[in-house]
Amino acid sequence: MDRVGVLVVSYGSRESAIVEALKRSEEYDVDLYIVDRQRNPFNLARAREHVVVPDLDVGRILSFAERFRGEIDFGIVGPEKPIIEGVRDLVEGRTGIPVICPTREFAIEGSKVAQRILFQEVVPEANPRFKVFDPRDYSSIDEARRELDRWLDELDNRVAVKPDAPAAGKGVGVWGDHFTSREQIHEHFAVNYREGAVIVEEKLEGEESSFQALCDGEHLIPLPETRDYKRAFDGDMGPNTGGMGSYKDVGECLPFMTRRDREREVEIVERIFRRLRGRGRNPGLIGMPFYVAFMHTREGPKILENNSRFGDPEILNILPILKDDFVELCYRMLEGSLKGVDVGGYATVATYKVPPSYGGYMEAYPERVRRDEVGTPIELEEAERLASLHGGRMRIYPGSVELRDGKIYALRSRAICVVGIGDSIEEARSISLEGIEAIRGGGLWNRTDIASREHIGRSIAHMEMLRGR
């Protein structure tokens, strides 16, 4: 087999799945050069060279790539921060190592305002109504608030308030979830406004799906649909998180979607892609420039937001069942020869186990916290034994954990993801939860209704109601 060296910029479980997919290659002998946010035991065991860069600073990523430039054939980046900050532009410009992720110019995840304006020009029917409040356009915050009140009157307060930049200010707030009065909207708005532009858009009613597509700069190849669970607690309660789990059905669509829903999503993203691509091939779009959160409404799919990276956890539903060699897919993206992606016809369910501080669990359910386990090492041995018995249908992906003195400890974010693979969603869910329940220590907890029959049934009924059936 040909040897290939791959630079991987890693944050959590998403990158563990990328690492596994690369090492699973039957066509290439893969050496991994990993820049990691922490000492992830999964990555450490598979890396030829490994370095910890807690803030994923692009300068330090560049230094690592320069050190091994003669041994690295290409790189792939998972987390959004270095992508938005232009890590590809820097590494390619200084080392010549090709990198799989969008360039800074095409990482449109970096500005929610710029996204909305682009979508309004290209696919206005998929855009919710919105208004931008830029401090440069107002003499004072009081003037901005008066304009905000007129907009809230028009939308009857049913809005989502978002900072322009990811994770700025107070973050995204939604009517009925983060605020239930105009005063609370004003408070949320003001905190974000102090950081820069704020976008206030109508709150959409419907069911959410995640659309992901690989791109070689000329061809856009959609992957099967997935459904993410953003809310912390069962029943879609609690604050938004990075995603507590996700599922994929055996085909391209989700149970509550129609074939026309899928076709409309593809049409919408293709139109945005063609606008950004221009004529011919645009290498700036290599990787996954479109990981789109859609809301399926009475009027059809609407775009909630676009991310310029692989989904977490959604890509964990795809990578374990790829039939194509992932290293070969990477080369096709770099060469401009990506004509398709062969994904196995399985259902997959990804469930995260997280520390008690995550999502406000300790405050919301203090009686459920296993306080004697908080801060203790995480034990994966039983889960790994079960994974071996399932013959590849259970995958364990450590995320926000750290190896210290030979033991694994949870950090502050999503700790471990277990993916179940089955011939139905129910079978995949059962396998995922079996692995999750076998993980001990750390006081970890998880949602229990990811991909449950009841949750999916409610989604189906909701869409039938919206469609007037």
Image: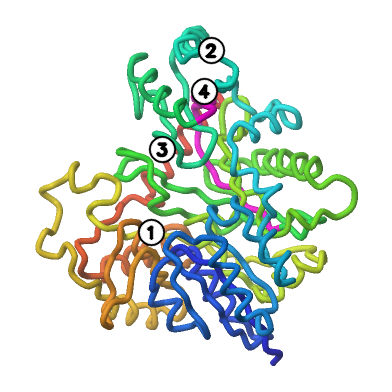
Mark 4 or mark 2, whichever is nearer to me: 2
The amino acid marked with disc number 1 is: Thr
| Mark 1 lies on residue | 351
**Contact between labelled residues 2 and 1, with CB atoms less than 8 Å apart:** no
> In screen coordinates, is 215 left or right of 196?
right
Q: Is residue 313 magenta?
A: no
- The Cα atoms of the two marked residues, 4 and 2, are separated by 19 Å
Secondary element under disc 3, as helix, strand or loop, is helix
Q: Nearer the viewer, residue 33 or 55?
A: 55
- The Cα atoms of the two marked residues, 4 and 1, are separated by 32 Å
Query: Percent from the top left, x then y, of residue 36?
Result: 47, 69
The amino acid marked with disc number 2 is: Ser
Label 4 or label 2, whichever comes before in sequence order: 2
Q: Nearer the viewer, residue 365 or 298?
A: 365
Residue at the far right: name it.
279
Secondary element under disc 1, as helix, strand or loop, is strand
The amino acid marked with disc number 4 is: Val
| Mark 3 lies on residue | 458
State which region is magenta. 196-214
The mark tally for this picture is 4
The amino acid marked with disc number 3 is: Arg
Label 1 or label 2, whichever comes before in sequence order: 2
| Mark 2 lies on residue | 139
Mark 4 neighbour class, 10 Å CA radius: few under 14, some 14 to 19, many 20 or more: many
Secondary element under disc 4, as helix, strand or loop, is strand
**Contact between labelled residues 1 and 4, with CB atoms less than 8 Å apart:** no
Q: Nearer the viewer, residue 324 or 261?
A: 324
- The Cα atoms of the two marked residues, 1 and 2, are separated by 48 Å
Mark 3 or mark 4, whichever is nearer to me: 4
| Mark 4 lies on residue | 200
